Amino acid sequence: MSAAAPDAAAPPLTLVVRRTVRASAARLFEAWTDPGQLRRWWGPPEVACIGAEIDLKVGGHYRIGNAFADGSVLWISGAFERIEPPRLLVYTWCVEPAGAGLERVTIRFDEKDGATDICVIHERIADPAVRASHERGWNGCLDGLAAYAAGTPKSRQTLPK
């Protein structure tokens, strides 16, 4: 009898990351959807955003470039499924080149008392290692967004020449 294969039918995983940022939902929605602003805060400290393209309409595509200290570059792309300014964004998520199925990201911006609660829901994640990587990435992104909203530049790595 052969050893059991990993369960290929394991249900996909979901990640939820939350942060409260002292800024309006409209300000944060704009920072998330304007390529010039997104490049200033996107990614954890060890990642530099080297490119951002955003066609903000349902069915429109986005593409974000992430450069790492080791010189590697990772591109994330997808298409917008729902856009409800300034409260909601829903889009697909794929690391290029396209591999497994599309993941989905939902961003909720709930403004109250001079601040906005941001909730990132990342669904359809294939395995626990990818989920852990997304968790580090999203926490870094939200740290960068909070610093950007406060007028503090995000500390960036120095890219290799």
Image (spheres, rainbow, N blue to C red):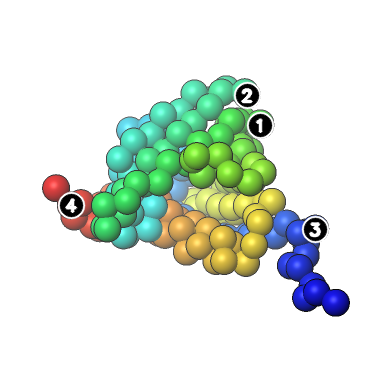
Along the polypeptide, which appears first: circle 1 or circle 4? 1
Q: Amino acid at mark 3?
A: Ala
**Cα distance between the residues tagged 1 and 2:** 6 Å
User: Circle 3 sits on which residue?
Assistant: 9
Q: Is residue 66 visible?
A: yes
Q: Secondary structure at mark 2?
A: loop
Disc marking residue 160: 4
Asked if the residues shown at circle 2 and circle 3 are in contact, with their CB atoms under 8 angstroms apart, the answer is: no
User: Circle 2 sits on which residue?
Assistant: 58
Farthest residue toward the front? 1
Along the polypeptide, which appears first: circle 1 or circle 2? 2
Q: Amino acid at mark 1?
A: Arg
Q: Nearer the viewer, residue 130 or 22?
A: 130
Image quarter where the N terminus lies is bottom right
Q: Amino acid at mark 4?
A: Pro
Q: Secondary structure at mark 3?
A: loop
**Cα distance between the residues tagged 2 and 3:** 31 Å
Along the polypeptide, which appears first: circle 4 or circle 2? 2
